[in-house]
Amino acid sequence: MNTPSDLHYLEMHELSLLIRSRKLSPVEVTEAQLARIELLDGALHSYAHVAAEQAMAQARQAEQELARGQCRSPLHGIPLAVKDLFHTAGMPTAAGMAIHRNFIPQQDATVVTRLREAGSVLLGKLQMTEGAFATHHPTFAAPVNPWGADHWAGASSSGCGVATAAGLCYASLGTDSGGSIRFPCAAHGLTGLKPTWGRVSRHGTFELAASLDHVGPITRSARDALFLLSTIAGHDPLDPTSLPSVCLEIPSVEESFRGLRIGIDEAWLSDGVDEEIIEALEEVLAIIRDGGGSLVRVRMPDTRAVSANWERHCGVQTAVAHAATYPSRAGEYGPALSRLIDGGRALSGMDYQRVLLDAQRFHGELECVLNEVDLLLAPVQPYAAPTHEQLGALAQDPEANRRLIQFTAPFNVSGHPCLSLPIGFTASGLPIGGQFIAGKGGEGVLCRAGMALQKVSDWHKIRPGSL
């Protein structure tokens, strides 16, 4: 078979049609992906572990099944990769931590099981920050942003962002506890979905903060995000916090803004936000109006307290998650994760209750706003991906750090779903990320809006020039 020269940049739903029509072979596609990983990832460091032999075995099995007319799902034969905090039977799962470098689970995480049952090909595990917090462990190589090596690759799901943007997998699974699906999508021109909390099982997923952790897809389009979410969503008896309902089927989602009410709070959207980001949001608003959507002025609840409290909220839960190894093995932890856990351990019960009360206030006020509209529009962050030097300065300034997460972390605290997607580029050529926020269970309307935007724009189709 003849393979397209840009095979590695196909969207997942496009590749699925080619594989199911027998125009492309899962074996050819997987071989091409492994060759590209071998060629590029020595410089990009997106993979923590490449499972070449297992991937080829899965590709051959998929090819045989499809030849017999057995199609398990639209994902059958498609090479994917997952963040290195999802348990994978017989494959290392370090969660970015030196102390877990040699941990090999005996069972898969539920989401990995669902990908395997769907017939997808697992290329390997993607690199991440230590324990899914802020920075990489000093002994691990940090993934490199293909849009600019001097710029941030986007928080804990950084390997997912780099691999998906660089054409080293067709999509990936990440997690988001304060922005870690949305930040790498904004940094790399990708589309990512942080679902409603509980929409996707967390069983077999290394925990950062149980009530903040969300599992979701990182992809090249809103259609692909729904494509992947439809496979991994749904109740899991092994995760009692998972929701009983399932996601909308792909054919039921209309690619249109017609009739949708989009909430806009101009003061909130412009609070400390770079002019280039504001201009990009204004272009999206024009597309929404032209597409038949209506813009509704709303007043967002105050996000300052909930974003300022996020690290304390996370720190208490992270301290619980690491109780078996911290402080007993504290010397093996990196400085950022140690600081987070120490802060959580030191927080009093009364102070934590105040954090929880602020979270409940924000949740209730946000629910009231979302009762008036179908979606909210926001940036992912106040500026494009910062340089590493700028990021280092942020770590020393609590207020600057709060501003970085002011459009992401509040929706982890509330559990509402968000779709991050590219909405333009800076004058220097860096991607700009925006997001839609919906009421709980609103993944279908999020993807509808994302597909409507991507139907008339091409920001999501622009790839890093360096590759």
Image (cartoon, rainbow, N blue to C red):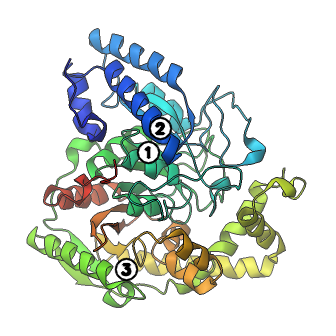
Residue 61 in sight = yes
Q: CA distance from mark 3 to mark 1?
A: 36 Å
Question: Residue at (15%, 76%) from the top-left corner?
Answer: 286
**What percent of the width, then of the height, locates residue 126?**
54, 43
**What percent of the width, then of the height, locates residue 395?**
63, 76
Labelled pair 2, 1 in contact (Cβ < 8 Å)? yes
Instruction: Describe residue 317's horizontal placement relative to residue 401 as left or right.
Output: right
Inspect the image, locate mark 2, and give the three-letter code of the amino acid beneath it.
Ala
Q: CA distance from mark 2 to mark 1?
A: 8 Å
Question: Residue at (40%, 84%) from the top-left corner?
Answer: 300
**What percent of the width, then of the height, locates residue 434?**
33, 69
Q: State the residue position of label 1.
A: 163
Q: State the residue position of label 2.
A: 81
Q: Mark 3 or mark 1, which is nearer to you?
A: 1
**What percent of the width, then of the height, locates residue 366?**
44, 77
Residue 361 in sight = no
Instruction: Describe residue 23's horizontal placement relative to residue 118 as left or right.
Output: left
Q: State the residue position of label 3.
A: 369
Instruction: Kindly state the secondary structure of the residue where label 2 is placed.
Output: strand
Labelled pair 2, 3 in contact (Cβ < 8 Å)? no
**Which quadrant of the view contains residue 262?**
bottom left
| Residue 60, above or below 420 | above
Q: Earlier in the sequence, mark 2 or mark 3?
A: 2
Residue with the most extreme bottom position? 267
